[in-house]
Image (tube, rainbow, N blue to C red):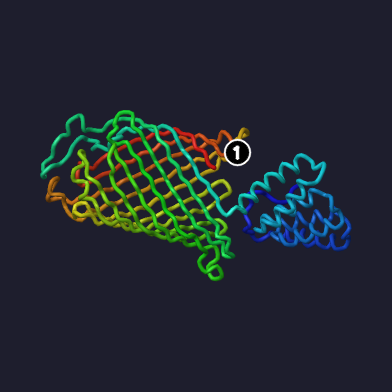
Amino acid sequence: MTFGGQHESNAQTPPASADRAAYDSAFKEMIGDPGNLQKAFTFVERAIKVGDLEGAVAALERMLILAPNLPRVRLELGVLYYRLGSYQIARRYIAEVLALPDVPPPVRQRAEAFQEEIDRQINPHKFSGTLLFGFRYQSNANAAPTAGNVRFGGLDAQLDRQFTAKKDGNAFVIGSFQHLWDFGLQGGESLDTQATIYAARQFKATAVDLLYASVTSGPRMWLLPSQLPQVSIRPYVGIDYVILGTSTEYWAPGVGVNLDKKWSDVAVSFVAEVRRRDYHNSKKRPFNDFRTGWETFGRISADWQVLPWLSLGAWAGAGRFDAKKRFESYNEWLLGVGAQAMLGQPAWAPGEQITLTLSAARLWDNYDAPDPALDPGTTRRDREWRLSLTLQVPIAERLAIVLQAARNARSSSLPNFDYTNYIGMAGLTWRF
């Protein structure tokens, strides 16, 4: 029997009345017979179940006086101190377990796993991330008008075949990384640096090969821990860089702030950001710098663990982009919903979950003024749907196959920007 779990949360839910009654009964029996180790173990189990970790620790430490050579007692003390956040004390007990002779193999394996996790927690520098690489098919890889119609100078025209929607595939890699530098302060403050990189190489339409890189860094602090428990704030600076085809598309330095709040089953996050996008001209895009300007946006999202196997999410956002030219300036609104179902643990990857995720988002873009080169009498208005269904199947610890089907469809007041794109993706993801 084991009492703790390596990945259990420290948050406690109110105990049921039956659990509380069993806890009270076990406590009385232990006090009435303090030399009975089995009664003490029963109390420890009941205490953990109702959330009295400190009471369980006290009982185990008394047991050490009676039986100092029991590795199980020292291991459970290490586990409980780990759950309480006392990593140095936890490590001492785990080290004592590993130093004992003739430790049963299951106990030794569990102790070694906890020692590794404790060392990771003690280290002030923590690095984690996710890599996804694979292949993607798109029915409209160049985002061309689906109907092949465009408008120039207020007149409708038919696109030449070479500029219409092109089916294509690509090989891609996405990496998300986080480095936390714990300052070792009582409040748990740290420097939180996050980076994302995306690279896609098209098989045919190489003009839309893409490289995107983003880095943000800033201190994460607990905001008014007494008045607002579990609320963290992270002001940050950052920069984005994009290459489209073989030319730099834009740089975008900026500043922002994250606010995060967690409850037992709900997590809410808010982000606000200001960036300066500096677009670069190229042979294929000689007027790209018309889009240079300031971008401001805010977004709020919430995730709710409805059932042990089902979570729901929702997000909303609003943004403003002020470009050099009014016909490139616009307001944007975003609404989205999602659901994720955990379908069980495969026999070949215990501890990992098969997941199915569905998401839907709606975007509204309203531009400030007509583009005289396209239609001097029509201001651009875009409406877009983004739908996706993603299946993730683990094949080993931290390694999974990812399959996705998606559809993006935009309708616009100008036919130049109407498009529909069907997407299929297969990849392999690894988290570390």
Q: What residue is drawn where x is 80% and y is 48%?
A: 71
Place of residue 199 in the rendered image (x, y in percent of width and height, measured from the top left): 38, 38
Vertical side of 4 occupied by 231: above or below: below
Q: What residue is drawn where x is 76% and y is 39%?
A: 105
What is the secondary structure assignment of the residue under circle 1? loop
Say left or right for 17 vs 181: right
Q: Which residue occupies the foreground of this view, 129 or 350?
A: 129
Q: Which residue occupies the foreground of this view, 362 or 195?
A: 195
Say left or right for 336 vs 224: left
Q: What residue is drawn where x is 58% and y is 48%?
A: 308
Q: Which residue is mark 1?
A: 345
Q: What residue is drawn where x is 72% and y is 56%?
A: 48
Vertical side of 316 occupied by 163: above or below: above
Place of residue 137 in the rendered image (x, y in percent of width and height, measured from the top left): 37, 32
Say left or right for 92 vs 383: right
Place of residue 214 in the rendered image (x, y in percent of width and height, measured from the top left): 39, 48
Place of residue 161 in the rendered image (x, y in percent of width and height, measured from the top left): 19, 29
